[in-house]
Amino acid sequence: MNRRQPGASTQRELRRTLRGLAFCSPWIIGFLLFSVFPILSSLYFSFHDYSVLQPPSWTGLSNYVNLLTDDSLFWKSLGNTLFYAIGATLIGGVLAISLALLLNSNVRGLAVYRTIFYVPVIVPVVASTIIWLWLFNPQIGLLNYLFSFLGIPPIPWLTDPRWSKPALILMSLWGVGNSVVIFLAGLQDIPRELYEAAELDGASSWQKTRFVTLPMLSSVVFFNLIIGLIAGFQVFTQAYVMTSGGPADSTLFYALYLYNNAFQFFKMGYASAQAWILFLLIVACTAFIFRTSSRWVYYAGR
């Protein structure tokens, strides 16, 4: 009778563990080199005066203090970013839900419409930005041309501080197809029995939407809200390509100001502190939404 030896079993488990780690090692090494190391480095540099060309010198909390108390552009960029993030997330969310409801109403050619709405998402951001530069052109742009039929005078979309941020929010609707697909998947998971029960109770279309669709879709709304806000806080490419932060710093978003400090003014320590403030701000907003989600998000089975 063969007796099982505990030492041999331990060696086999060790070999399996090492084999598994060997297969995972490319990802682990990449994660440590390209994610963990830059994150820890930025935290280190945020407490230093560092210009890349000179060794970093310790300055303590001065970068954070200067940002919060002595930098008007910091607050200006933060305000611009909040305006954009809230506007783009709310308007984009309402539009995405509306389109998903229309596509969910047994329309013919659903796959075609779904593709049409999703195609802009796969267009590179720089390419779509150049397209929108032409659309916003006050002289030859398509938008002003269409508005001229309604008697609306040309709108200086990107040259007037009053219109620049709304213009970029309007442009953000270009990528609403991604949310439409997610909302549509959520709508098709809602049990038909709930609608049949509501119809037996005499509910109207609006009442079915208000008391059945939206509550059952709340977890998807919650997901899109978090993703949309995080993306809104990090908006960069559109302003960098189209306006460079102008006019009058009206589109100087937080990420663009951070980029300018890091790669134009070579204030790496200052930019690192700015990055950590943005990180803490995103964490705080996300935590707040998570904390309030128990009041309005419905999860089946809970």
Image (cartoon, rainbow, N blue to C red):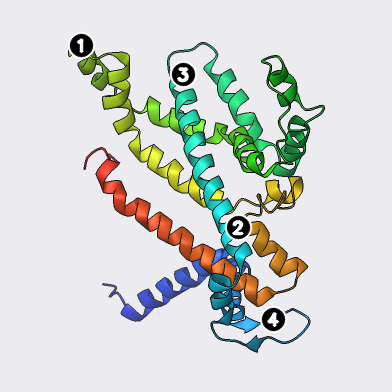
Compute the Cα span from label 3 to label 4: 54 Å
What is the x, y in percent for residue 135? 74, 30
Q: 26 or 181, which is in the foreground?
A: 181
Tell me which corner region of the image, top left, top right, bottom left or bottom right, holds residue 143: top right
Q: Residue at x 44, y 48 (%)?
A: 226
- N-term-proximal mark, 3 vs 1: 3
- N-term-proximal mark, 2 vs 3: 2
Q: 90 or 115, which is in the foreground?
A: 90
Nearer to us of marks 2 and 3 is: 2
Compute the Cα span from label 1 to label 4: 68 Å
The label shown at residue 102 is 3
Q: Mark 2: give few (<14), some (14-19) or many (20+) Cα within 10 Å.
A: many
**Secondary element at tag 3:** helix
Looking at the image, how many numbered discs can be counted on the residues? 4
The label shown at residue 77 is 2
The label shown at residue 202 is 1
The label shown at residue 50 is 4
